[in-house]
Amino acid sequence: MVKLCGIGAGYVGGPTMAVIALKCPSIEVAVVDISQSRISAWNSDKLPIYEPGLENVVKQCRGKNLIFSTDVERHVQEADIIFVSVNTPTKARGLGAGKAADLTYWESAARMIADVCTSDKIVVEKSTVPVRTAEAIEQILAHKSKGIKYQILSNPEFLSEGTAVQDLLEPDRVLIGGNEGPEGQEAIKKLKDIYAHWVSEDKIITTNIWSAELSKLADNAFLAQRISSINAMSALCEATGAQVSQVSLALSKNPKIGPRFLNASVGFGGSCFQKDILNLVYICECNGLVEVANYWKQVIKVNDYQKSRFVQRVVSSMFNTVSGKKIAVLGFAFKKDTSDTRKTPAIDVCKGLLGDDACLSIYDPRVSADQIKKDLSMNNVQWDHPIHLQPLSSSSSNGLEHVDIAEDAYEATKDAHGICILTEWDEFKGIDFQRVFDDMQKPAFVFDGRNILDVGKLREIGFIVYSIGSPVEQWLNNSVNSAVPF
């Protein structure tokens, strides 16, 4: 029986190893993590992350050929193939601070592997890492090898949160990069044979290891670029009276462009896009490619601009102040069908509103109250690190005394002056907005940051509505034109 060990029981490691266990019943799969609370959750009826279909996969395999454990060293030592899915946050200080990837956790994992292993291993990069990380890992393992041979493979994930299980079960591609010598090619074949249990051969791409590492960064950069591009167009649509959804539809019919990632919104979030683009910028700068670095920086600048523009619209529309006003925030996760709040646009929007002394009532169907308050109390660096290194609880500072967590949308919106839609949960489309309107302060505002609501019906009820990239009501236009710059 082949034994696999996945280091890191997070959003990548947990689902990935669970699906491998499901599709390869003859393979023993261990998922290890130093966080006892996280492993306990994986072994419970309430998993530490929410993904549609994940609970069913775990229940089918757990206790059979899938185990979750904190006994990291034992399972690493016993494994034939080791998948490493540890955090690679942006460096907070030192060389490359604010842009470069912090490889502290990766290096620690590599040193632990070298210390405990007594037989040859294949080590697989699942984390998103800078180009040529494998070279550094090889050097660490070689200097501590004690005669043991290691092959490093790059096998980046291309998962979308909310559809991660489906993406794993029916991937559009599996990318495996390795050394071009005979031993490297043999290692590639072994990993390829595992995926071949359920992935057709034409979808398994093999490259050299550097191409695989860079492909992941490029993939996220290109997707984020499309989102920033349509969001930039949404600002122009509002200024000219065009409708961004109509522009998106026209673009989507061009087969050279296609329909994906063309929905305007309050901005992109998640753990990867900004972090990976910053990493790409740093790599470009280190290689003297200043113009290329500046190009990718602009993708992030437009994303930040979109969030600031949304906050400005809320404040200026409501008589240029939200001080003491209750604002209902519907949605906190960075996208629907996930509980992940890493780099969610809701954090910056909420902090912007709190900075103007608003009172927030936040509701999200999947994100806990403790997580919301923790996110709003942490800086941009803290949340990017493993959960066991984050603050245990939120503080009462940073305006959190003006934050309430509601049990449902009706509680959040009762007596509110305005509503901000920040996550495209399907649940929000079915809200009884007549009931909501009746219970709100007047005039009642809706700011749809995801373009999921029927603007015409809301206006018929009596709401003053702002929807990103849509022609702006005269009230809102006049408010913005007379407002003090944000």
Image: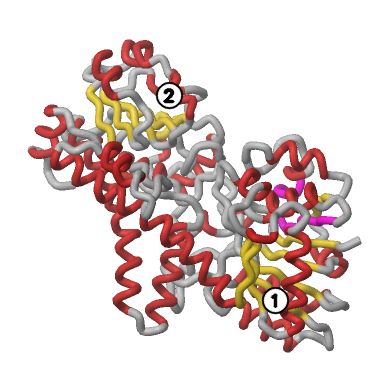
Q: Amino acid at mark 2?
A: Lys
Residue 336 point in image, percent of width and height: 50, 37
Kindly state the secondary structure of the residue where label 2 is placed: helix
Residue 85 point in image, percent of width and height: 66, 61
Q: Is 234 in front, or is 188? A: 188
Q: Is residue 276 above or below residue 255?
A: below
Q: Is residue 477 above or below residue 196?
A: above
In the rendered image, residue 34 lying in the magenta stretch gets the answer yes
Residue ID at (42%, 39%):
400
| Residue under numbered circle 2 | 429
Q: Is residue 179 above or below residue 407?
A: below
Graded by Cα atoms within 10 Å as few (under 14), some (14 to 19) or many (20 or more), the crowding at tag 2 reads few
Residue contact at pointers 2 and 1, CB within 8 angstroms: no
Kindly state the secondary structure of the residue where label 1 is placed: strand
8 left or right, relative to 421 = right
Q: Earlier in the sequence, mark 2 or mark 1?
A: 1
Q: Amino acid at mark 1?
A: Ile
Residue farthest along the right direction in this orientation: 1
Quarter of the figure with the N terminus: bottom right
State the mark number for residue 132. none
Q: Is 386 in front, or is 288? A: 288
Residue 448 point in image, percent of width and height: 32, 32
In the rendered image, residue 234 lying in the magenta stretch gets the answer no
Residue ID at (32%, 40%):
249
Q: Residue 57's quadrant in the figure?
A: top right
Residue ID at (41%, 74%):
282
Q: Magenta segment range? A: 28-40
Residue 74 point in image, percent of width and height: 86, 65
Q: Is residue 73 above or below residue 141?
A: above
| Residue under numbered circle 1 | 152
